[in-house]
Image (tube, rainbow, N blue to C red):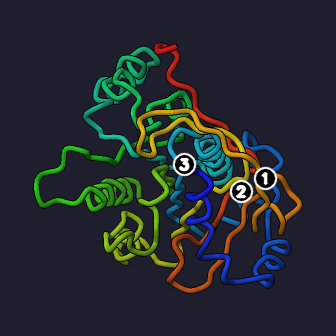
C-alpha cells in the first residue's frame, strides 16, 4: 500500500522523463541535517510568503523540517508563523497557558491516536515552537464544521486569518499531503487551492507547496486498517536515482497543473511514536 501511495505521488513528475532527472540533479539543494537547515535553503525559499508542507501522517521528518525551517526564517527575518492541522478547541487550555502539561493533557493529545497526527512528532514540534516568542503558533483545522461547509475551506480561513493578523510574517503550514495540493483532489477544492485563489492575501508566485517523498523506512498511521506500523522496503525511484544526496530540497515551476512546486526528499522516513503517556 505504501509503495502504491508513493507511486501515485511521484507519477505526475515521471512524465518529464530523463530531462527532469537531470534538472533535479542540477538544482537540488543538499540538506546536510534536517535539524539544522543551511542558509542555502533559506535563500531558495526566501521569496515565498506561504510555505505549505504536506506529510504522510505518522512520520517524523516533515515535523522536524518545519521546526528547522521556522528557526531558519526567524534567524533571517525575526518572526514567522507556524500552523498545524489541528482544531483550535482541542488545544484550548494549552493556547491560553502553553505548558508541556497542558499540551500533554489537551483534548488532542489525550485522545486515541487514530491517524498519526497526535503522536510524538507533532507534540515535540508544538512544544518547541511555543517556547520561541518569535514563532507565532496557530491551528487551522475544524473537524466539526457545520453542514454544507467544506473542511478545506475552513482550513484556508484559518490560514488567511493568520496572514491578516501577522501580515509581515511568512507562514509555514503542516498538514496532510492532499490539503496542500495546488489542483483539485477528486473534484474537491483543497486548502492550497483556496489560498492560491485568494490573490488579495496570497500572490500565486509567492506560495510554495512542498511534498515529502522518501525511498524506505517506517510510518505509524491509518490507511484504512486502523493505526498500524508499516515498513517501506527500499526501491529505487526517480528521486533516489537522479540526485546523489540522501536528503535534499528541490523547487520547480512547470505551470499550474502540478500538485506541488517543491519536494523535500529524505532517503529514509521514520515513524512518529505514539505520545509518551500511551507507551
Residue 211's disc number = none
- Left or right of 201: which side holds 252? right
Please tell me whether residue 181 is drawn above or below residue 114 in the rendered image: below
Instruction: Find the distance from the CA under tag 2 to the CA under tag 1.
Output: 5 Å
Residue behind mark 3: 79
Q: Quadrant of residue 98?
A: top left
Residue at the right extreme of this rendering = 244
Query: Could you tell me which secondary element the residue under label 2 belongs to?
Result: strand
User: Is tag 1's residue or tag 3's residue first in the polypeptide sequence?
Assistant: 3
Give percent across and percent down for residue 2.
58, 51
- Are the two marked residues, 1 and 3, in contact with CB atoms closer than 8 angstroms? no
Residue behind mark 1: 247
Residue drawn 85% across the image and 75% down it: 26
Residue drawn 28% across the image and 29% down it: 92
Mark 1: few, some, or many residues within 10 Å (few <14, many ≥20)? many
Give percent across and percent down for residue 275.
50, 22
Residue 265's disc number = 2
- Are the two marked residues, 2 and 1, in contact with CB atoms closer than 8 angstroms? yes
Amino acid at each position: 500500500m505504501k509503495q502504491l501511495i508513493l507511486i501515485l505521488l511521484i507519477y505526475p513528475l515521471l512524465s518529464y522523463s530523463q530531462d527532469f532527472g537531470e534538472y533535479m540533479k542540477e538544482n537540488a539543494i543538499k540538506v546536510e541535517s534536517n535539524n539544522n537547515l543551511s542558509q542555502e535553503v533559506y535563500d531558495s525559499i526566501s521569496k515565498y510568503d506561504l510555505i505549505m508542507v504536506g506529510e504522510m501522517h505518522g512520520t517524523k521528518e516533515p515535523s522536524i523540517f518545519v521546526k528547522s525551517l521556522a528557526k531558519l526564517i526567524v534567524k533571517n527575518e525575526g518572526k514567522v508563523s507556524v500552523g498545524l492541522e489541528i482544531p483550535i478547541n482541542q488545544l484550548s487550555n494549552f493556547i491560553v497557558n502553553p505548558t508541556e502539561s497542558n499540551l500533554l493533557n489537551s483534548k488532542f493529545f489525550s485522545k486515541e491516536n487514530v491517524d498519526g497526527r497526535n503522536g510524538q512528532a507533532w507534540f515535540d514540534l508544538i512544544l518547541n515552537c511555543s517556547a520561541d516568542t518569535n514563532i507565532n503558533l496557530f491551528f487551522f483545522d475544524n473537524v466539526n464544521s457545520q453542514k454544507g461547509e467544506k473542511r478545506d475551506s475552513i482550513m484556508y480561513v484559518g490560514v488567511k486569518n493568520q496572514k491578516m493578523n501577522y501580515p509581515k510574517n511568512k507562514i509555514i503550514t503542516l498538514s496532510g499531503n492532499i490539503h496542500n495540493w495546488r489542483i483539485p483532489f477528486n473534484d474537491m477544492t483543497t486548502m492550497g487551492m483556496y489560498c492560491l485563489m485568494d490573490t488579495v492575501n496570497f500572490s500565486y508566485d509567492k506560495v510554495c507547496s512542498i511534498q515529502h517523498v522518501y525511498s524506505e523506512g517506517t510510518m505509524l498511521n491509518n490507511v484504512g486498517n486502523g493505526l498500524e506500523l508499516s515498513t517501506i522496503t527500499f526501491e529505487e525511484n526517480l528521486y533516489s536515482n537522479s540526485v546523489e544526496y540522501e536528503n535534499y530540497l528541490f523547487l520547480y515551476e512547470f505551470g499550474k497543473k502540478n500538485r506541488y512546486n517543491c519536494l523535500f526528499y529524505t532517503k529514509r522516513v521514520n515513524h512518529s511514536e505514539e505520545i509518551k503517556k500511551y507507551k
